[in-house]
Every structure is written in structure tokens, then in C-alpha cells.
Image (cartoon, rainbow, N blue to C red):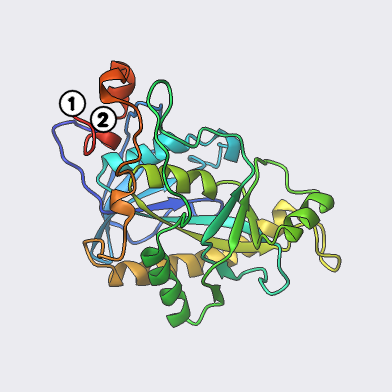
Amino acid sequence: MMDKKKQVKANIGILGGTGLYEIEGIEDVERIALDTPFGPPSDDYVVGRLEGKEVAFLNRHGKGHRVLPSEINSRANVYGFRKLGVERIISVNSVGSLREAIKPRDIVFSDQFFDRTKRQNSFFGEGIAAHISFDQPVCPALSRVLFQAGKELGLKVHPKGTYICIEGPSFSSKGESLVYRSWECDVIGMTSATEAKLCREAEICYSTMNLVCDYDAWHEEEEPVTIEMILENMQKNVHNAKAIIRRSLAGLTSQRGDECRCGEALKNCVITDPALMPPEAKERLRLIIEKYVKF
């Protein structure tokens, strides 16, 4: 476990998903196991330096890909990043395309979400209420850096799109897929919306890099979606994702710019009278709310 006396810091977090289980080239590596008030994270954090930046990498599905999307303890994962000092998270996700123009092996930097899940997607509750703004669910500054890096690398990247987040673990039926298209969603996945809400509450910049693996079930001319198809396309896209991450890290400044408001996203959002907050719930949220609530 992490020594409480040792201040392990990482400014940038990387959340890996299907196919992206590690990042090669991280120097001065240390594996950190953390406890959180919300339970254990998916795995140890791999902390070190990449392209001159202090980073922390986490595999959201755990070692050997043992955790289903609905089983991921996203609250613990995001809290752990915050505990390490992370201010920006780059999330890598495998998705299906709901648009002809978004082809397998493209990369989409989604800027909106439609959340169809019923998961624990807030740190709050049990006596403390807060309501964040979520009209811009990702950090535009961080997403722009990632998109620009993809363009400079000559990759097929899309700067925006609506990500519909489903519970899984099964893929969509054709009927569901057609309905999602009619709702004007662009890609479909099982993880990112939950993470985005928690990062907003934790005042962490969040951007999702969506690696397109298939056309989902709606496409008449494509074969049915299989895990083999997804993994084949994912393996070919993971190399590009890592290249984007490295190029983006090299260009990121150590401090968030004035354009970014993620660092004050919880300001005026905690509604509960501090005098009425249950002590256990208040202490559990100390890392999240101590900037705004007197202890």
C-alpha cells in the first residue's frame, strides 16, 4: 500500500480500456496500490514519467481483463487518481460506430454523452447533496490538444460526437442500434459517461479518446459484431492511441490554462448545510469538498 508519508504525485492520468492495458516507455515506474473510501480501484496505478510528464496509468478492467463494464468501481478509480494529484485524465475507450462516416479504426473525441446506465456515478449521497453542471461533459482544452495531436500524426480523427453509454456486457440488438442512430448518437460504448461525471465532481479535466472497432449492429452490409472483430481492430488502433498520448503529453503545459474551468467545477454545487452533514459522509468526501466546506 502507498505510504501515507510519501507524497506520490502525478499530474496526468491515463485510463486504459480494452486493448490498452499498459503504456510502454514510462520511466521511473512505481506500482501504487491505493485504498479509497469507495473501495479498491480496478488495479494498481503505474506511476512514472512519460514524455517528461508525471503520469499515472490505470487499467479500468483490471489485470487480465477481469472486470465487466458494469462492475468497474469508477468512483474508486477516479478518487485514486485525485489522491495521486492528477488534474487531467485521458480516457481510452473502445466503441462501435453509429454513423457511416465514422469508420472502424477511426478515433472520435466525443464531446457529449447520453447515459443509459444505472450505476453509481456520483461521489455524493448519504446525507450530502451536490449538483454539478454537465452541459460540457469533457474538457474542451484537453480534447483539442488530443485531436490536434491525432491530426498532426495523419490519423483519421473526429473532433466531436455523442457517445451513448449502455450497461452491457452484451452488444446492442439491431433494434436498439437503430434507435440509438435515430437519437443522433455517433458512437456507442459502456464506460465513459460514468467516468466523465465523476471527474467533473472531482474537478479533474476529462477527455475520452474513442477507438472505433466496428459499425455496431445497425449496418446491413457489415458482419455481426463479434469480440474477434473488435479485438482485431482494437490492436491496430491501440498503436495510434499511444502515439496520440505521447505527442499530447509533450505539448501539454504543467498547469491548466485560463480557458479550462474544470478545476472549479464543484464551486457553489454542494447544497447541503455543512452543519447538517453526517460526519462519516463528510470525512469520506474530504478530498473532494475540502476546498469549499470547512472541516
Q: Is residue 252 above or below residue 91?
A: below
- Amino acid under label 2? Arg
User: Residue 124 placed where, x, y %?
Assistant: 41, 30
- Which residue is pictured at 35% across the width and 40% down the height? 269
- Which residue is pictured at 62% across the width and 64% down the height? 212
State which quadrant residue 52 falls in. bottom left
Mark 2 crowdedness (10 Å alpha carbons): few <14, some 14-19, many ≥20 = some
Q: Quadrant of the N terminus?
A: top left
Do residues under tags 1 and 2 come within 8 Å of each other at their CB atoms? yes
Report if residue 42 is visible in the image: no
Compute the Cα span from label 1 to label 2.
8 Å
Left or right of 210, for residue 47: left
Q: Quadrant of the C terminus?
A: top left
User: Residue 73 placed where, x, y %?
Assistant: 48, 34
Residue at which label 2 appears: 286
Mark 1 crowdedness (10 Å alpha carbons): few <14, some 14-19, many ≥20 = few
Left or right of 117, for residue 247: left
Q: Secondary structure at mark 1?
A: loop
- Which residue is pictured at 18% across the width and 31% down the height? 4
Circle number at residue 295:
1
Which-is-in-front pick, marks 1 and 2?
1
> In the current view of this chain or complex, which residue is farthest to the right?
220
Q: Earlier in the sequence, mark 1 or mark 2?
A: 2
Q: Is residue 120 above or below residue 59?
A: above
User: Residue 56 placed where, x, y %?
Assistant: 32, 50
Q: Secondary structure at mark 2?
A: helix
Report if residue 77 is visible in the image: yes
- Which residue is pictured at 50% across the width and 70% down the height? 240
- Amino acid under label 1? Phe
Q: Is residue 62 above or below residue 113?
A: above
Left or right of 263, for residue 150: right
